[in-house]
Image: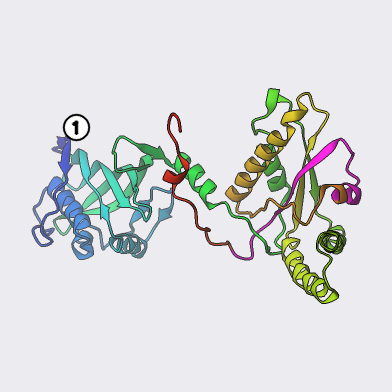
Amino acid sequence: MKRIIICSIVLLLFVNFPAIAFQNKPGLSLEETFKIYVNAIHNSDIKTLFSTVTSKRDFYCISSKGELFKTLKEYYDIHSNRFKEENREMPVELIEVYEEKDFGYTIAVFHYKRKTQSGRKYNLDSYFTMIFHKEDGMWKAIADICTPIKEYFSEEDKNIEYDVNQAYVLNVIKNRRTVRKFKPTPVPEEHIMKILDSARFAPTAGNQQPWKFLVVRDRERLDRLKKEALLWYVESYEKRKKPADEEINSIKEKLGKILDDVLSAPVYIAVLVDSKAKYPDYVIYDGTLAVGNLMIAARALGYGTGFFTTFFPEDKMKKFFKIPDRYRLICFTPVGVPEKWPDTPPKKDLKELVVFESF
């Protein structure tokens, strides 16, 4: 059998041809058919694209996420949804064409690019191996296998790139929220320990690691804490303000509703630091940094948290939980699935906050 092998061809197909410039038909070479396929993608022309795809046998597609699709309908839906995307482009490098009488394949690099809402560009570079056979004298694809090469985000300055892991961490930090009402959904102990493991890797003075993490899951104990916290706050308010009975009753009602929500999570963590650590003047900083890690790790796993101190005074909490005197309370944070993720509150423009070199 005579073989026609075209290898190591590097052809950049950046041009969007008119939608009807190419149509699949008998007698075209495999490379010409592949160009029709690419042209159809550039023009979001699903009809022309499917003129290059089999209609007489099973079709297999492996996506960039490793998903296996076995039907033409699934393949159709993939492209139909992709073609609806705005600000999309996909330059293609054709690497190799292998063509025999009734069988062949193409290997190409597809550079998928899409502008995100934040203004950055999402990029996915992938190898696409497409397998073709002859069908009514035309080359028709019977399999489409995607192998991701690089997934990243880029800024306007094309030299600045962030891989998906870097972008994920930055997004988790931006999406952390203080949550004040939770669903009763349980938090697996494995997740609790993973969150606390992240907290213990926070920076610390002289590696002293002065932390203690008191984990509270007992609902009866938390309900008792709710009653006590209400009394603590009212007692403190009365000492400071000398309010009338009507005002006290109003405060009790409002605060009761707030505490119902704040103490609705399935898990709470009292972040403590040892005041007798090697560098006691720094334990507050160490503890606060640990809380930051804890909150980011919790958000990465889908949980809300909160840096709560107002309703949980240190001296009262020590007595309630029998915390040794040597420990100081940094905060009492819930960990749970939010009833609803709060919107992002207004943030100052970064330019207001940054000073380079000197004031």
- The one of 30 and 107 positioned closer to us in this rendering: 107
Colour pattern of the rendering: rainbow
Give above or below for 301 relative to 337. Answer: above
Horizontal arrangement in the rendering, residue 266 relative to residue 46 (left or right):
right
Q: Quadrant of residue 229?
A: bottom right
Q: Amino acid at mark 1?
A: Ser
Pinpoint residue 303: horizontal percent, then vertical percent: 63, 54
- The one of 336 and 146 positioned closer to us in this rendering: 336
**Quadrant housing the N terminus:** top left
> Quick check: can you spot residue 18?
yes
Q: Does the stretch in magenta take in 326?
A: yes
Report the residue marked by disc 1: 8
- The one of 308 and 12 positioned closer to us in this rendering: 308
Q: Residue furthest front?
A: 242
Horizontal arrangement in the rendering, residue 142 relative to residue 294 (left or right):
left
Q: Residue at x 68, y 56 (%)?
A: 336
Q: Which residues are magenta?
A: 317-340
Horizontal arrangement in the rendering, residue 236 relative to residue 158 (left or right):
right
Pinpoint residue 111: horizontal percent, then vertical percent: 28, 44
Pinpoint residue 90: horizontal percent, then vertical percent: 25, 49
Q: Residue at x 76, y 64 (%)?
A: 259
Give above or below for 348 relative to 220. Answer: above
- Circle 1 residues within 10 Å: few <14, some 14–19, many ≥20: few
